[in-house]
Image (cartoon, helix red, strand yellow):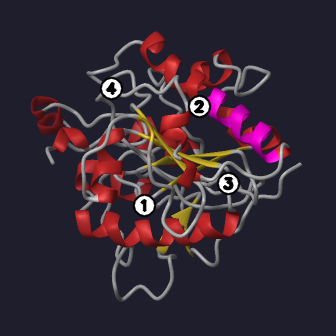
Amino acid sequence: MSKRALSDEGGCSPKTKRAAKETKPLDPKKFGGKTEEEVCQMLLPDHLAPSLDIIFMGINPGLYSAYLGHHYCNANNHFWPCLYESGLIPKKLGFMEDAEVLNYGIGMSNIVPRTTRSASELSRKEIKEWSKVMIERMQELKPLVICFNGKGIYEIYTGGKCTVGIQEEPLPGTDIVVYVMPSTSGRAATYPKRSDKLKFFSELKDLRDRLHREREEGGRGEPSSNPAVSSNQGVAEDGGKLQSSTVSSETSNLTGCADSSTSVTGCGSKNCESPISKQSTGGQVSQRVPVIVSSRK
């Protein structure tokens, strides 16, 4: 898998020349005087609750998301406009209001909690180990759908190729329908325009509505009934990159980093006794103690 298959929460990983540029130290003025190392110690809160309709899963927090403490905060990211224009939420929201998505049955998280400047800094081993934690969380929370925001990371997670759209198999050990969409980053090469990505959000809304109808008529739509086949609106095209997130309180003031390049120890390590590692929140070092799941209003 090329570096390009990896992405931060903002979308696809930079091209080679851009990646070389990003090895330069960041200007601390951009992050309130904090160095890159300090920002990478910050945490991005998850917005999760039991029995949601959809949980959007990214790869890991990037610098700006972690620093600001909000998901998809890059101005070039198409996530928030597409979420509203598709009808998945009834009112316009911006990244500063990301916790409000819980009111509409939507959650946000990442596979790996560690903040980096670029997701290419994550090892396959780290992604695999945190994927196990992610699956355990989803088994407890039981959303109708888990939507991976990016194709590349989903392929690393599964170890195989996939097409974007509804996947044939549910999340392991669950009946949670898996949907893969292209990265919502404006830098995603295959689907660079907002209109390119909107159709995937619209299909996701159709999937959610169909599963609601099936549940009302007698039960949840079983993934074993192959929703990919029963839906004639499936978009089976390549493209996009994937992302994910971790769990925290809706009212948490934790801030985290949404770009990859961190030296945090313990994340994804076999020596880490819990899915929690020492990072900092709001510039103060703290231990990530058991995940706090946001309550839904």
In the rendered image, which quarter is residue 11 located in?
top left
Q: Which residues are magenta?
A: 205-215
Q: Is residue 23 visible?
A: no
Instruction: Say which label, 4 or 1, has the lower sequence index.
Output: 1
- The image shows residue 233 at horizontal and vertical percentages of 52, 23
Q: CA distance from mark 3 to mark 4?
A: 25 Å
| Picture residue at 64% right of the left edge, 77% below the top | 290
Look at mark 2 in the image and give the residue it sits on: 204
| Picture residue at 16% right of the left edge, 31% below the top | 15
Give the secondary structure at mark 3: loop
Q: Kindly identify the amino acid type of the residue bearing the numbered disc 4.
A: Glu
Any mark on residue 27, and which?
A: none
- The image shows residue 8 at horizontal and vertical percentages of 36, 43
Look at mark 4 in the image and give the residue it sits on: 237
Q: CA distance from mark 2 to mark 4?
A: 15 Å
| Picture residue at 38% right of the left edge, 78% below the top | 266
Instruction: Say which label, 1 or 3, has the lower sequence index.
Output: 1
Q: Nearer the viewer, residue 66 or 213?
A: 213
In the rendered image, which quarter is residue 227 located in?
top right
- The image shows residue 130 at horizontal and vertical percentages of 41, 68
Any mark on residue 112, and which?
A: 1
Q: CA distance from mark 4 to mark 1?
A: 26 Å
